């Protein structure tokens, strides 16, 4: 006789109404994030395995071929905390994959564990290994040797949807036919995936230059001057490697950084514009609207509302 709304998706055998994160969409979002950065080799890394793990893995692997690394399937649970055993296993895994590659982890604890192992093995993150976690806990993500990019599961939105469903049930409405799934809010980009897998060393240098000078009024000409490259040949070389022009890449990086800064209430829109190389807030607002279909202020408000 007690009304219940489950906010997890771990026990489908228990017949109760559910509001939960769309874990398939989490995996698909990770795949799209890696595809945008041109990573062709992808792995899944987790300590355990459950229905939620499986859904995220399925969403990832249906879009990109991915190798699955699950600690619990390789090492008995009683030895999971044995550092030597774990270190040998993960070191062999890291050694076996051609670089660069990308990894989606189940959550922040797995991401921190993989980051530590990579650093001990002398693998640079994100240049050789890009790590994306799920959960977006700033206390964990931003306090790693390399800050962790993470997928925001939209947990707050899920809580609101769960409360609304419970209220409807209390008013006598019937239970929904299936699970109510809340899509993830997006990827919060930090340093651990702030890289693009490229084979051309000159293009790699160009990408690093752009990332280091986003606050400056740079364009393709300034990038070529900094690299000592001829403009005509470099433009062709960059487009062949990246599938977009130098100018398009500069804009992409500016938009990615702007979205990260907009999540911080301490940054005014004017400050975000200046930090990302726009000459004025109005110029920034127009470019942001053209790229994202909404204004910076509305985009920020939507994230604060958990939408």
Image (cartoon, rainbow, N blue to C red):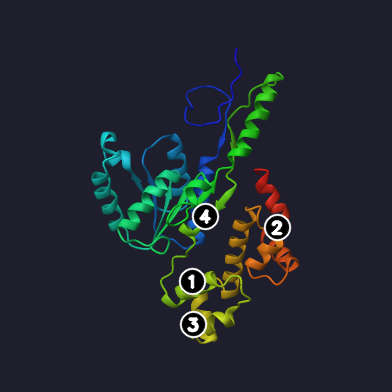
For label 1, the crowd category at 10 Å Cα-Cα, with few meaning under 14, some 14 to 19 and many 20 or more, is few
Look at mark 4 in the image and give the residue it sits on.
32
Q: CA distance from mark 2 to mark 4?
A: 23 Å
The answer to whether the residue labelled 1 contacts the one labelled 2, judged by CB atoms less than 8 Å apart, is no
Q: Is residue 240 above or below residue 143?
A: below
Give me the disc on residue 208. 1
Is residue 136 among what the camera can see? no
Residue 30 image point, x, y percent:
49, 51
For label 4, the crowd category at 10 Å Cα-Cα, with few meaning under 14, some 14 to 19 and many 20 or more, is some
Q: Is residue 11 above or below residue 95?
A: above
Counting residues from the start of the chain, the first of labels 1 and 2 encountered is 1
The answer to whether the residue labelled 2 contacts the one labelled 3, judged by CB atoms less than 8 Å apart, is no
Q: Residue furthest right?
A: 282
Look at mark 2 in the image and give the residue it sits on.
296
Is residue 169 among what the camera can see? yes
Residue 155 image point, x, y percent:
58, 39
> Dot 3: what SS?
helix
Counting residues from the start of the chain, the first of labels 2 and 4 encountered is 4
Q: Is residue 162 above or below residue 22?
A: above
Q: Name the mark nearer the viewer: 4 or 3.
A: 3
Q: Name the mark nearer the viewer: 2 or 4.
A: 2
Look at mark 3 in the image and give the residue it sits on.
227
Q: CA distance from mark 1 to mark 2?
A: 26 Å
Query: Residue visible at 37% across and 38% down?
Result: 48
């Amino acid at each position: 006789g007690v009304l219940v709304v489950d906010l997890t998706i771990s026990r489908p055998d228990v017949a109760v109404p559910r509001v939960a994160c769309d874990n398939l969409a989490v995996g698909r979002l990770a795949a799209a994030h890696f595809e945008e950065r041109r990573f062709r080799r992808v792995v899944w890394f987790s300590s355990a395995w459950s229905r939620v793990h499986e859904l995220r893995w399925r969403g990832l692997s249906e879009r990109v071929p991915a190798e699955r690394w699950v600690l619990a399937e390789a090492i008995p649970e009683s030895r999971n905390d044995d550092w030597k055993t774990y270190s040998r296993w993960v070191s062999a895994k890291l050694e076996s994959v051609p670089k660069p590659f990308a990894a989606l982890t189940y959550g922040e604890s797995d991401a921190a564990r993989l980051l530590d192992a990579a650093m001990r093995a002398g693998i640079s993150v994100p240049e050789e290994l890009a790590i994306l976690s799920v959960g977006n806990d700033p206390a964990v993500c931003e306090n790693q040797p390399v800050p962790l990019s993470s997928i925001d599961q939209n947990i707050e939105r899920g809580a609101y949807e769960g409360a609304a469903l419970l209220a409807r049930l209390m008013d006598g409405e019937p239970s929904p036919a299936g699970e109510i799934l809340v899509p993830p809010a997006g990827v919060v980009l930090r340093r651990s995936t702030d890289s693009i897998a490229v084979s051309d060393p000159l293009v790699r240098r160009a990408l690093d230059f752009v990332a280091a000078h986003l606050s400056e009024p740079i364009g393709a000409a300034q990038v070529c001057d900094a690299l000592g490259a001829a403009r005509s040949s470099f433009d062709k070389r960059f487009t062949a490697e990246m599938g977009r022009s130098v100018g398009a890449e500069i804009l992409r990086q500016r938009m990615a950084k702007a979205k990260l800064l907009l999540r911080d209430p301490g940054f005014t829109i004017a400050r975000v514009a200046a930090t990302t190389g726009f000459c004025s807030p109005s110029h920034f607002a127009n470019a942001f609207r053209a790229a994202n279909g909404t204004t910076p202020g509305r985009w920020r408000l939507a994230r604060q509302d958990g939408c």
